[in-house]
Every structure is written in C-alpha cells, then in structure tokens.
Image (tube, rainbow, N blue to C red):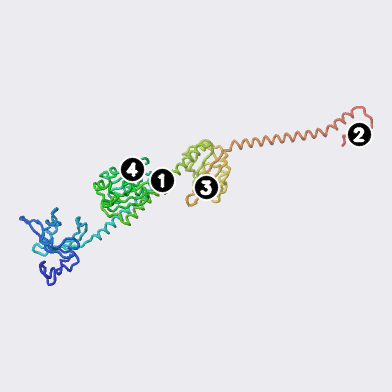
Amino acid sequence: MQPYPTAPGGITSPTHPSYRSFIESMPEGVAVNRLLWDTEGLPLDYEILSVNSAFEEQTGLNAAQIEGQLATQIHPEAEPPHLETYARVVATGKAESMETYDPALQRHFAINIFSLGQDRFVTAFADITARKFQEEESKRLNRLYSVLRYVNQTVVRTGLRDELFAQVCRIATRVGGFLMASVGITGPATKRVMWIGSSGDTHGYFDKIEISVDKSPLGRGPTGTALREGRTYVCNDFAADSRTQPWRQAAAESAIGGCIALPIMNNGKVCAALTVCAREAGVFQAKEVALLEEVADDVSFALDHMEQEAALQETTRRFRTLLDEVRLVALGLDAAGAVTYANPFFFEITGYTPDEVLGRPWIEHFIPERNRSEISGVFAELFGKEQHIHHENSILTKNGEKRLIAWNNTVLRDRFGKPEGTMSLGEDITERKQMEENLFRAQRMESIGLLAGGVAHDLNNILSPIMMSASMLHGEVPENVRAELIDNIEE
C-alpha cells in the first residue's frame, strides 16, 4: 500500500492551512485523529481533530459538532470503533485498509488508515455500499440459480405433492440462504391458510400467524393476496408495508426483513403459495423475483405432471386389471420382439410361469419352428406398415402342444411416433377350429352318402323294366309279345 500522501511541501500538520486545503480537495471522507492511551500504555480512545467536507457528506455528521470530540462521546453506546486497528497503525507506522459496515448509517465503507506520527493517524474512507449491494446481489442470484437447478432435479424425482413442497422449502433455505420458507394452501372449511413443509422457521412464525384468503386485513398480506389473486406479492420492507400490520410483531421476533409470496398453479388454478422470507429488507429485486417465479412455475408444472401421471397410472391399473381377468391371451412385446407382458390366461393355457416367459424372445421360444419365418415377417410388416392387424398362428405350450390363437395386434409408439413395441389380444380358437374341421368332415361324409343313395336309386329305375321283361319271358307268352319284351331288354 502506498503511504498516505502529504500536502505540498511535505506539510503533515492537520492544523496547517495548506494541509486543510489539501484534504478538502480529496473525494474520500477524511478524518485526522489522535490516539489516547491509558496509564498502562494501552489504547483507550481517540480524538477527532479535523474532518473534510466529504466526511460530512458521507456520514451526515457536522464538523463543528465532532471536531475535538472523543470517539466515546460520539459513540457512547459502544467501544470506540476499530480502536485496536488504529492503535496498531500508530504503533507500527504501517498503513492498513479494511471494509466495514456502519449499522447506524446503514452504509458500507472501505477505510485506509495511515500514521502521521506523534500518536496521530488519518482515516480516508469511500462509500462502497453500491458495490457491496452488487456483490451481494450477485451472490444471491448465484444461489437462486442453484435453487432453480435443485428444484428442477427434485421435480423429476418427487411424485408426491407434500413431499415436493417440503423439498422446495428446504432448498430455498439451505441452498438459497433465505431465512425461512413455507407453502400455504387454503383450508377447505375455514378458508384459512394451512402451511406445508416449512423450513428455517426456528421461532414458529408460521404457526403463530393467522392468514385468510378473503379481502379482510388478514387476507390482504403477501400470502393471502397470492392465493386469492394469483399474482406475486413482493414485500421488500416488512416493517413498513401497510398490509403486513397484523403480523409485524411475529415477524420482528423472527427477524424478518422482507418476504415474497408466489402463486403455485395446478391445471390453471391457484392451489398454493410459496412464501419466502429474508433477513434483510430490499432483497427481492427484479432479477430475484424473476428467478423465484421460475421456481414457482416449475413447481406448478410438476403438480400438473403429477396429476396427469396419477390419471395415467389409474388408467393403466384398470387396463391391467381388465387384461388380468379377461379370458383372452394378452401379450406385450418390445421392439426387439422380447416379451414384456403376458396375462394370467396366457400362463393358464400354456403352462409356463412368468419367469419362463418375460424377457424371452417370443418367436424363437414360443412359435413352432416351421412358422417362425412367417411370423417374423408379420412382426416386421406390423411395425413398418401396420399390416397384419388381425392374424392367426399357432403357439407352443410348455409340454410341446400347439394352441391356435386369433390375434388383434396394436403397435405401441413413443411420443415421437417411433414404434416401441406391440400389444396383442388373442382368442384361443384351437377347440373351435377342431370342431369346425370335425363338422366339415361329417358334412362331407353325409354328402358322399347322399350321392351314393341317389346313384343306387337311379340304377334301380333302369333295371326294373329289364328284370320284369326277363321274368315274363320265362312264362308262356305269344311270339309277338316275346319279341317286344326282348326289344325292351335290348333298349
């Protein structure tokens, strides 16, 4: 660090006119001080000898009121600020610098301390509140990006509403560094807010307060407004916001400086509000609000997905129940032709167990060898052209018997339309086919019998005149009649 600059001509006396003119020209706030020691040689206090105009502007203190005053007189409630550091600079002659926050002024300062000799030292400081605010905002935004990332991961893993709410609140406090967080929902009977998954609430704030969703004073605060109107409510100064009056005492006990309430939607309707509290006022600026609204949107999306997933699972359960109970063969195959599902009726008629079927190649293990090439083609054309929606083929049972199945096939596709498997329902028509074949054989035999009977009848019609004529020839008949009978036989 460079030594503290001296006035022109090397003048260092704070009472010299040139020195005062010199420090007045500096943009930093400057104070020239004299260190005081006790009888044991320990630093006791320091006297402010002179200050410049920048000092007055940045601190709001008047030079006439503080010049010649001791630090303990200006700050009677505490030890003289930074006494140990100032004493070290005076004792060693080495300049030091530091950053500090003045709670009375609510400002951040960067201070450089230089020794002037003879127990005198000078402090030159600059207001760095804006820089500190930017640094803190940058840290908050980085934490909020982490919150958003962790919430997105939680949305993927969590399938229950209350568990999701609790996880989001924990992420807000542990990752985001916020004082506390909770999710409020409307009680169905009381129209009062009920809290789910609170995190960081060491003083029981959420348990103490009462919030409604109507337009009464208990419903006009951040959470009630978010639930009733479906909009974000930003409260950057809890103690000054007129709508937070009913909860100020509880908020002060929990050291709440500000808060934000964000609506959470489900199917386009407000179902909850995420309330996040901070220790400091003024935390929730435009960028912070935008990121937290993105968090709320992700939670809303997750709730919609959960509901859709629950509906899908219920539909799947009912469909699976139907397949399990129907007296038809139900068979699912993946894109490679391996069995992914078979219902109890399949196992009943084939004698297999699930372990012997699931995951096994269908054609290789359950189709007669002479039909495998044909069924492979059917499977390929079903995927490629959705042909062979209806098809009949034999399958092999565990004991080697064949069962003839009449299939109705459906191609299963992913959300991009790519085939990912098939689901088939099949009727076991083995006995019906056997009965049809038996009936066909019986009908054919009956037809043959009828044909033979008809031929015999026709033969009988032809032979009757011949037999009659031959019988009459054995008797005594006139010659002319005999000749006629012979003609009949010859015809």
Which residue position holds label 4? 194
Mark 1 neighbour density, 10 Å: few (under 14) some (14–19) many (20 or more): some
Name which of mark 2 and mark 1 comes first in the sequence. 1
Name which of mark 4 and mark 2 comes first in the sequence. 4
Q: Are marks 4 and 2 in contact (CB under 8 Å)?
A: no
| Position in image of residue 41 (x %, y %) | 6, 56
| Position in image of residue 170 (x %, y %) | 31, 47
Find the distance from the CA under tag 2 to the CA under tag 1: 107 Å
- Taking the spot 28% from the left edge, 57% from the top edge, the residue there is 137
Mark 3 neighbour density, 10 Å: few (under 14) some (14–19) many (20 or more): many
Find the distance from the CA under tag 4 to the CA under tag 1: 21 Å
Disc 4 or disc 1, which is closer to the eye? Answer: 4
Give amino acid for label 2.
Glu
Q: Is residue 475 above or below residue 399?
A: above
Q: Is residue 151 above or below residue 129?
A: above
Which residue position holds label 2? 484
Name which of mark 4 and mark 1 comes first in the sequence. 4
Name the element at disc 3.
strand
Name which of mark 2 and mark 3 comes first in the sequence. 3
Extreme residue in the right direction: 479
Q: Quadrant of the N terminus?
A: bottom left
| Position in image of residue 246 (x %, y %) | 28, 46
Name the element at disc 4.
strand
Which residue position holds label 3? 411
Q: Is residue 484 left or right of residue 452?
A: right
Name the element at disc 2.
helix
Mark 2 neighbour density, 10 Å: few (under 14) some (14–19) many (20 or more): few
Mark 4 neighbour density, 10 Å: few (under 14) some (14–19) many (20 or more): some
Find the distance from the CA under tag 1 to the CA under tag 3: 26 Å
Find the distance from the CA under tag 2 to the CA under tag 3: 84 Å
Disc 2 or disc 3, which is closer to the eye? Answer: 3
